[in-house]
Image (cartoon, rainbow, N blue to C red):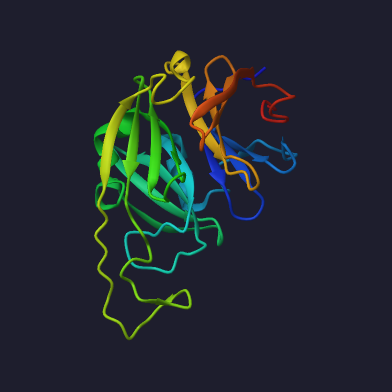
Amino acid sequence: MPTLKNIVTVDWRSGKDKIYFIFKDTDTYSRFDIPDNKVSDGYPWPIKGNWGTLENHMKNLRFGFTTTGITLDRPMDSSDLDILWLFYYERTTPMVCAYNQDTDAVMQTRKVEDTKWKLLLPHFDRIVAGTWWQVSRPSLFRFIMNDGNSLYLDLDEDPNRDRGYIGGKLDDDLPPPVVTPVQSLRTEPITEATWPGLAPYKDRIITAVQNDRTFADSYYYIFLTDNQFLTYNIPKNRLVSGPHAVDSQSWPGLLRN
C-alpha cells in the first residue's frame, strides 16, 4: 500500500467541492470529489500537461488553500471570486500564485515579499499547511509548522471598504480607492489551549486541507505520518476524531497506484 509522504493538499470551491492531493515524489496528483466521496476514476494523473505554467513549480510547492471574495494586491470586484493560493519556491525565492478557480487559469504570480502574504516570509520554509479560518471575520488564516508551532495571520482586509462599489462594480466616477490593510501575525505553540486535541500529533503533521461544508461546520483534515489523519472542527476549534487510517474506506481511491 502506498505511503502518504511529501504531499500537499489543497481545497477547491468552484463548482462541486474537491480536494487535490499533489504527490511531489512522483510528479502526480489525484482529485477527491467530496460529493461523491471518492477519487475519480483514472487518477493519479501526471502533473506535466495538466497544470499549465505551474507544472514546473509543483515539486517545490509548500502549501496552498482557497479563499472566496479575497482580492489580489490591487482593487478589483471579487465578491464571488474563488482563488487557489499556491505557495512555492522558485529556486530560493518564496513565490505565490493566485489561481482563478472559476476560469481555471493563473491570475497572478509574484514574490511573496511583494504581496499581502509577506508576513509569512520568516516562517515560510517551516509551514506545512495553511487554511482560511473564516470564523469571526474573513481576514483570518492559520498555518501549521513542522516545529510544533502555528501561525495566526490577520489581514484585516475588507475588499469593499472605501471603494465606491455600486451594483457590485467599481464606480468609475469616484476617485481611485485607497486601501491599507492592517496586518498582524503571531506565533502560537500547538497546545491544548490553542489547538485542542492536536498537541499529541504536532510532530507528525505532513499536510492539511479544509472541507468547506455548506450545511455543517467546516472540517480541517490533518494528515499524519503512518497513513493516518485527524478531523478537526474549524468553528468549534477542537479535534472531532482520529487518528483514523487512510485506506479504501476513509479515502476511496486515494492510495491507488
113 lies above or below 256: below
Q: Residue 200, position in %: x, y?
A: 46, 13
In front of the other: 126 or 24: 126
Q: Which quadrant of the rendered structure holds the C terminus? A: top right
Q: Which residue is pictured at 32% across the width and 52% down the height?
A: 156
In front of the other: 193 or 149: 193
Q: Which residue is pictured at 45% across the width and 43% down the height?
A: 56
Q: Visible in this render: residue 7?
A: no
Residue 185, image quadrant: top left
**Number of numbered discs:** 0
| Left or right of 216 in this view: 133 | left
Q: Residue 213, position in %: x, y?
A: 62, 43
In front of the other: 9 or 199: 199
In front of the other: 121 or 54: 121
Q: Residue 149, position in %: x, y?
A: 34, 24
Q: Which quadrant of the rendered structure holds the N terminus? A: top right
Residue 227, image quadrant: top right
65 lies above or below 24: below
Q: Residue 73, position in %: x, y?
A: 32, 59
152 lies above or below 110: above
Q: Which residue is pictured at 72% across the width and 40% down the height?
A: 40
Q: Which residue is pictured at 72% across the width and 37% down the height?
A: 37
